[in-house]
Image (cartoon, rainbow, N blue to C red):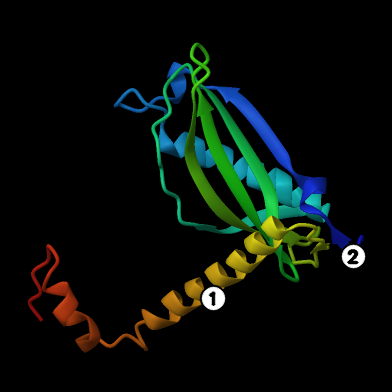
Amino acid sequence: MEKFKTSRESKVSITELMLPAHSNFGGKVHGGYILNLMDQIAFACASKHSRSYCVTASVNKVDFLNPIEVGELVTLKASINYTGRTSMVVGVRVESENITTGKKKHCNSSYFTMVSKDIDGKSMPVPGLLVTDVQGVRRFARSIQRKSEASSRTSRFDSSNFKVDEFLEGLAKENVQIDL
């Protein structure tokens, strides 16, 4: 196994025409279909980097920024942003393009944590990431920050750590009625 690889070595992109079969009841491309494509390209990118089968451990924040129309081309781009011992964060960007006008829209960006698995299903080490530019350092550092924030959210709201009094005042401004 190589000790380090650049993100360029495992970059993957796909382009697909959006068909009526991909649409939801509102006539736009179904978000679930796009998520499926995103998971597939994250798998391809992580597997290419690690040279192993990979599974999705988590997806960080999926925001649908712009709708995708039937008949548009959708391009998904994936690259490795971070490597841990057995996991990788894959950045996925989704863009749509109107075929007749050439207008492109950024539709989604998300981060998939993928874990490398051996033949027995046990987590296995992955090559580290060789970062060669400032953008790569930014992406790696941001992934560490996201990981830290996720850990903090998880522990803060764990039922054994949750302190209801810290939240009651703030919840009074929300569309909720609390009757404890």
Q: Which residue is mark 2?
A: 3
Q: Which residue is mark 1?
A: 148
Above/below status of 58 relative to 70? below
Check contact, mark 1 vs mark 2: CB within 8 A: no
Whether residue 132 appears in this view of the structure is yes
Whichever of callouts 1 and 2 sits on the residue coming sooner in the sequence is 2
Residue 160 placement: quadrant: bottom left
Q: Residue at x 79, y 47 (%)?
A: 8
Q: SS at mark 2? A: loop
Q: CA distance from mark 1 to mark 2?
A: 25 Å
Query: Picture coordinates of residue 91 (x, y %)?
Result: 61, 51
Residue 56 placement: quadrant: bottom right
Asked whether, in this view, residue 127 is left or right of residue 164, the answer is right
The furthest residue to the top: 100
Q: Residue at x 54, y 38 (%)?
A: 94
Residue 5 placement: quadrant: bottom right
Q: Amino acid at mark 2?
A: Lys
Q: Amino acid at mark 1?
A: Ser
Quadrant into which the N terminus falls: bottom right
Asked whether, in this view, residue 49 is left or right of residue 24, the answer is right
Q: Residue at x 50, y 58 (%)?
A: 60
Asked whether, in this view, residue 163 is left or right of residue 94, the answer is left
Query: Picture coordinates of residue 4 (x, y %)?
Result: 86, 62
Circle 2 residues within 10 Å: few <14, some 14–19, many ≥20:
few
Query: Picture coordinates of residue 172 (x, y %)?
Result: 11, 74
Front residue of 62/161: it is: 62
Q: SS at mark 1? A: helix
Quadrant into which the C terminus falls: bottom left
Front residue of 59/160: it is: 59
Above/below status of 71 relative to 6? above
Circle 1 residues within 10 Å: few <14, some 14–19, many ≥20:
few
